[in-house]
Image: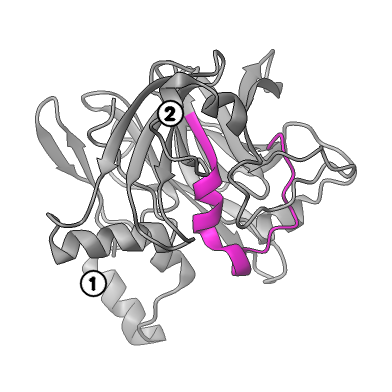
Amino acid sequence: MIDYFIYDPAGPSLRLLPSLGGTIPEVQARAEADGLHISKMMARRMESLDIGIIYRGPGDFAVAELQIAADDTGTAARPEVRVFNPAVSDQWVLKMPRIVPVHPRSDLDMDRVLWYWDTDAVAPFGTWLCWVDYTAGVMLYELFGESSEILFLELPIKQYCINRDEVGRGWLEAYHALGATDGGNVLKFTSVSSDDPPPSDGITKPVYHPFPNQFVVTTWSLKLAFGNNMTWKKESSVTADELRDLDEFGHLPRELFMYPTFNLNNPDVVSFVLKKGDGIYDVGEIWLVAINVMKKTVESSMLYIKNYDACSPEEIELFERKIRYFEPFLAAEFS
């Protein structure tokens, strides 16, 4: 049984949602019948990896969780969406929408996409909730309504060669981001990749330890047309050297940009983490920097962690874990 809460700081208020996965007696009954074990789905629920919310005001919200479940034969997968909308029901509602590619083509193997799907991030966009797998694409589902479809949109870069067992989820999060900006009205995607010529096969090769002087930050914006027609439009591309030549960059570490995060209001600004250290896993200064990727300027920067002399053992362990396992930093003091 997993309990979720919705916190509204404006109230403030804290609302407990109906349990996801059944009541305590139902969970106990399943454990007695099948034995107690932690499935992959349960583990992901415990980390809130597949759930998101669209909040439009007090009492006007919808929460949804996407699960990719095997069908009755165990040889194929299908999407299942559990939705909680207090305006519709006081319980979670299970929906099984059919998946519809936005740009269908003969060589698009949706069975393979679903079978290997692993959500990296969840983002609200208008009335859509978006689940992204950085090796495949984005699934978009209309939360407010009776939609029987979930749209699948490929990302503007192809990374099918990435082996998740080798690089893990953390690497993908460290160098990619999907998020809404401009008040939630614009969906954007960004990637930090090696500054090499485009590959002939169109597949972006994973760069496990890119050279700091050879990377480029690229952003795309989702353009909507009539119906469900959607296309990615490349909007900006800025190299490391273009930024390091700026006077405003002089005091910053000449290191690889990590953990891109879109500004909620300005669609042209992306924030990054810069780590100063002597090695891959060495812990040094941590900087947060905001870049206007359209103007190719440094908007602002802040020293997030200077040293560890004044830190508690718990804080030091937290910082080291973030660096070693590529866990995002919460930029609570950064604006």
Q: Which residues are magenta?
A: 155-179
**Residue appearing at x 35%, y 78% in the figure:** 30
Can residue 272 be spotted in the picture?
yes
| Rendered residue at 73%/31% (across/down) | 102
Q: Position of residue 248 (x, y in %)?
A: 42, 21
* Amino acid, disc 2: Gly
Which mark sits nearer the N-terminus, 2 or 1? Answer: 1
Q: Nearer the viewer, residue 78 or 260?
A: 260
Q: Which residue is mark 1?
A: 25
Quarter location, residue 265:
top left
Q: State which quarter of the image contains the N terminus.
A: bottom left
Residue 169's x, y, as percent? 52, 58
Circle 2 SS class: loop
Q: Is residue 64 visible?
A: no
Q: Is residue 121 left or right of residue 139?
A: left
- Mark 1 lies on a secondary structure that is helix
**Residue 88 drawn above or below residue 98:** above
Does 180 sit left or right of 294 as displayed? left
What label does residue 250 carry, if any? 2
Mark 1 burial class by Cα count in 10 Å: few <14, some 14-19, many 20+: few
Question: Relative to residue 309, is residue 332 depicted above or below?
Answer: above
Q: Is residue 117 left or right of residue 204?
A: left
